[in-house]
Image (spheres, helix red, strand yellow):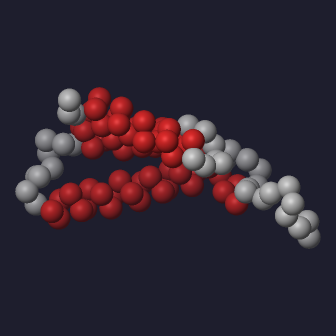
Amino acid sequence: MRGPLAGETIGFMWGLLVDASGLGLVGLHALLYAAAGYMAGMLRRQLDEDKIWTQAIFTVIVSVLYVVFYLILDSGSSPAGPTRCRGRFASSR
């Protein structure tokens, strides 16, 4: 099984694993990993498997897009923004 559906499915499952291990917004990583997997599956035939530079460039582009969308979506999920992981026992200054 290869292509967009496989990439999306595998990305979604990995994203759920990341979501389950964190304290952030549930489903955010699953959504972003599924989108990245779908994009990789769609562009699978256009990328040359023998050239490492095309894969490296694609990986960098997808990584940057992932971080940008993560910061955009995570900042809107709570009033405190991405640094909202303050425990109950943190000092209140």
Residue 48 image position (x, y, % from top left): 10, 52
Could one spot residue 9 in this view of the protein?
Answer: yes
Q: Residue furthest right?
A: 93
Determine which quarter of the picture holds residue 86.
bottom right
Residue 3 image position (x, y, % from top left): 22, 33
Of 62 and 91, nearer the camera is: 91
Residue 31 placement, left or right of 42: right
Residue 35 image position (x, y, % from top left): 39, 39
Residue at 57% in and 41% down: 20
Task: Answer above or below: position of 71 versus 26.
Answer: below
Determine which quarter of the picture holds residue 14.
top left
Residue at 27% in and 44% down: 40
Q: Residue furthest bottom?
A: 93
Task: Answer above or below: position of 44 versus 55.
Answer: above
Residue 70 placement, left or right of 93: left
Determine which quarter of the picture holds residue 80.
bottom right
For the N terminus, the image quarter is: top left
Residue at 30% in and 57% down: 59
